[in-house]
Image (cartoon, rainbow, N blue to C red):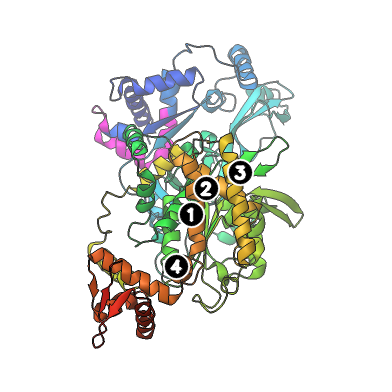
């Protein structure tokens, strides 16, 4: 670029920064520069959307900015240096930088040779802020595959998932030396990842004296930037069939560091640049260069609950929803509305998303607040679909399957860092899901050795590692949502629940809910299910629920608002909860049921679920209705363990058939029931004709009804 072009573009940049006004008519960038001068912010982000909306710019300027972005970052920074206003407020002095700058400006005028490029003070060393250029907000981001060599030097926008983050290290931007002979400060700008330090003083005085002055690198006077290298991987939906996901290296500098962590799904805009190999690699690579993206802005697709900022309309919607008396059922029905039934399971999953606050005692002991759920059931009851949906709703979720996960893949692996060649820990699925949800499908197919890795995570919420000289504990504050099939693929009613649920008691007692979903043949419910599935298949949406299901974004906003509440258990409920827990223990002792492990963990589960229910109401205290609902949900998850409805009601087959006939007759308002009708009713519930005949004879002998001798029609005798 010619010199006059540079000057002209700098004037254009100054004009834009001085005159661009936001929607309220305020000078947007001048206000930002004032905040920079007052040290309130440390960077200025120039948005391309603003450049488009600015009427006084020529057409080519915007194109030059997008196609030669690295250069224009420098042009905008130079324009800002000239426009920088005086500070209007007192600010804390950064001792090293500010004192050194004061000394340099006082001394620099008389003892530096300004013609010498090494002695001219670079503008970078004076600058105490950074400049970024942000890509257009509209327009879909590229996938990593679509960023080709033709984009080198340009501003591109990509999306992906962060797989690895390096530590934040200092990166030298300007090296400052002092000469032992002449005492001058020599400046060397560093633009690449590697640089050759100066050894001889290049100043005019040393040249005239023919003394090769020895240079000493002054680390305190040099300028360093925060630097972080991040690996980003393509999203699963962007990978073509049969291909391996591609990765790209991203360099974060300055204020953009520490913005992402492994497991985040992000959208980045940055400058696509080559990085030539150095040293031995250069000999091997020849003409090939590596590429990286120098990040300019980063936006998260799903924000963590803590970072969620409610927009104006969301706040109103949440307040409206909170006043709705039936919000608990509505929120639960809005989870996977395409899946038929499972109302109570969806309620449990909603509580898993809300959770309870973590409790930390004075002595450092922690009581977990996350709710763990295990869905055990026959094939084809939409367990995996529920898991996938929960992961899509939760702001942070990791989905994995049992056979495809090793113990190391779940906890942490030790690997060699490619930059520093030291051993580093790379977090597995449970560590990536910290402060989120880890969904493990095919839980029963996991190796026993791998499954033990989950025990510690579920109760202590840490992952302890002792590998390759690294002994540490990593945080894994995650809610575990597991889905499993019974031991023989389908639930076998002839065996005990303990044989069917082939999981150790140590693991089962850690789950707050163990939900057993059986696929029973029932004419009425099967018809409804089939109609629902066909409707979804035809119309790509769920049938009318009587209300509009909430969007996942509104669900997330509501849950994030609910999670800010920390309810407490009032003293008057303590006795009620204690009595309920002891009665559950007594019932278990009487029934000798080998499948339900009621321990003190069950009591903590009741408390956790009650607090989650209170959170949904935005209440500061737990009500008795919350405890009752928690007990009901726990009871319902146990009910599903009984082989069928007869045992649920404690009735034998004959009594159950009688109650079905009586209820149906009362519902239709008849006293006469035909034999064909009766047979239809009971066959829907899974009973045989022989059982019906036995029932008819038994209750006719008791004079409850009269039977027609030929047609076997029934007439109820009015009591």
Q: Left of 310 or right of it: where is 466?
A: right
Residue placed most toward the observer, 209 or 249: 249
Classify 10 Å Cα crowding around label 1: few (below 14), some (14-19), many (20 and above).
Answer: many
Q: Could you tell me if the residues under marks 3 and 4 are in contact, i.e. CB atoms within 8 Å?
A: no
Which residues make up the magenta segment?
53-76
Closer to the chain start, of discs 4 and 2, is: 4
Mark 4 or 2, which is nearer the eye?
2
Q: Does residue 598 lie above or below 61 as drawn?
A: below
Residue 476 shows in this picture: no
Task: Name the residue carrying label 2.
Answer: 609
Question: Where's the N terminus, which quadrant?
Answer: top left
Which structural element holds mark 3?
loop
Q: Nearer the viewer, mark 2 or mark 3?
A: 2
Looking at the rendered image, the disc whose residue lies closer to the viewer, 3 or 4, is 4
Q: Earlier in the sequence, mark 2 or mark 1?
A: 2
Q: Residue at x 43, y 39 (%)?
A: 617
Q: Which numbered disc, 1 or 4, marks the residue that appears first in the sequence?
A: 4
Label pair 2/1, CB-CB below 8 angstroms: yes
188 relative to 601, above or below: above
Do we see residue 281 in this rendering? yes
Around disc 2, counting alpha carbons within 10 Å, would you say few (fewer than 14), some (14 to 19), or many (20 or more)? many
As drawn, the label of residue 243 is 4
Cα separation between marks 3 and 1 = 62 Å
- Give the residue at mark 3: 194
**Residue marked by disc 1:** 633
């Amino acid at each position: 670029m010619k010199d006059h072009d540079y000057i002209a573009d700098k004037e254009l940049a100054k004009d834009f920064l001085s005159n661009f006004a936001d929607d309220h008519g305020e000078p947007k960038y001048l206000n930002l520069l004032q905040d920079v001068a007052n040290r309130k912010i440390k960077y200025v982000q120039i948005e391309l959307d603003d450049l488009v909306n600015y009427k006084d710019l020529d057409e080519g300027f915007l194109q030059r900015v997008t196609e030669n972005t690295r250069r224009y970052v420098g042009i905008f920074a130079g324009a800002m240096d000239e426009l920088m206003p005086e500070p209007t407020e007192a600010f804390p002095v950064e001792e090293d930088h500010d004192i050194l700058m004061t000394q340099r400006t006082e001394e620099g005028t008389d003892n530096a040779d300004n013609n010498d490029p090494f002695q001219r003070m670079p503008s970078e060393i004076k600058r105490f802020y950074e400049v970024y250029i942000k890509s257009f907000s509209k327009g879909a981001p590229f996938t990593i595959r679509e960023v080709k060599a033709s984009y080198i030097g340009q501003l591109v926008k990509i999306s992906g998932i962060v797989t690895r983050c390096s530590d934040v290290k200092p990166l030298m931007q300007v090296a400052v030396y002092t000469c032992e002979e002449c005492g001058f400060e020599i400046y060397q700008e560093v633009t690449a990842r590697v640089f050759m330090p100066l050894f001889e003083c290049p100043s005019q005085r040393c040249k005239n004296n023919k003394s090769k002055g020895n240079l000493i690198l002054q680390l305190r006077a040099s300028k360093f930037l925060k630097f972080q290298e991040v690996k980003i991987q393509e999203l699963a939906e962007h990978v073509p069939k049969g291909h391996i996901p591609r990765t790209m290296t991203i360099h974060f500098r300055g204020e953009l560091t520490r913005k992402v962590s492994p497991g985040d799904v992000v959208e980045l805009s940055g400058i696509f640049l080559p990085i030539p190999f150095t040293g031995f690699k250069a000999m091997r690579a020849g003409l090939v260069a590596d590429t990286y993206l120098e990040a300019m802005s980063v936006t998260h697709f799903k924000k963590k609950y803590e970072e969620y900022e409610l927009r104006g309309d969301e706040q109103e919607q949440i307040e409206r929803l909170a006043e709705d008396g039936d919000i608990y059922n509505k929120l639960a029905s809005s989870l996977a509305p395409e899946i038929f039934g499972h109302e109570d399971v969806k309620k449990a999953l909603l509580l898993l998303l809300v959770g309870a606050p973590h409790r930390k005692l004075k002595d450092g002991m922690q009581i977990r607040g996350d709710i763990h759920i295990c869905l055990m059931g026959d094939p084809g009851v939409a367990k995996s679909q529920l898991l996938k949906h929960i992961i899509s709703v939760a702001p942070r979720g990791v989905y994995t399957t049992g056979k495809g996960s090793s113990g190391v893949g779940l906890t942490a692996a030790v690997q060699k860092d490619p930059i520093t060649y030291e051993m580093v820990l790379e977090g597995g699925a449970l560590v990536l899901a910290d402060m989120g949800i880890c969904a493990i499908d095919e839980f029963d197919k996991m190796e026993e050795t791998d499954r033990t890795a989950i025990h510690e995570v579920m109760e202590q919420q840490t992952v302890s590692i002792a590998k390759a000289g690294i002994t540490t504990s990593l945080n894994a504050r995650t809610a575990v949502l597991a889905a499993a099939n019974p031991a023989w693929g389908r639930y076998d009613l002839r065996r005990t629940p303990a044989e069917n649920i082939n999981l150790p008691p140590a693991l089962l007692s850690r789950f707050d809910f163990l939900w057993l979903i059986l696929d029973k043949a029932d004419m009425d419910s099967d018809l409804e299910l089939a109609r629902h599935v066909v409707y979804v298949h035809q119309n790509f949406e769920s049938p009318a629920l009587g209300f509009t299901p909430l969007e996942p974004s509104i669900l997330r906003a509501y849950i994030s608002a609910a999670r800010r509440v920390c309810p407490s258990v009032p003293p008057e409920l303590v006795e009620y909860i204690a009595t309920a827990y002891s009665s559950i223990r007594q019932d278990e002792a009487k029934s000798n049921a080998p499948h339900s492990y009621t321990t003190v963990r069950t009591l903590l589960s009741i408390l956790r679920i009650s607090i989650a229910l209170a959170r949904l109401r935005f209440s500061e205290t737990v009500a008795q209705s919350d405890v009752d609902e928690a007990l009901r949900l726990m009871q319902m998850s146990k009910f599903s363990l009984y082989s069928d409805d007869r045992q649920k009601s404690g009735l034998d087959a004959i009594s159950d058939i009688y109650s079905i006939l009586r209820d149906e007759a009362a519902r239709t308002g008849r006293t006469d029931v035909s034999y064909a009708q009766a047979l239809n009713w009971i066959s829907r519930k899974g009973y045989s004709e022989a059982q019906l005949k036995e029932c008819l004879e038994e209750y006719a002998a008791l004079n409850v009804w009269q039977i027609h001798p030929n047609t076997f029609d029934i007439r109820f005798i009015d009591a």
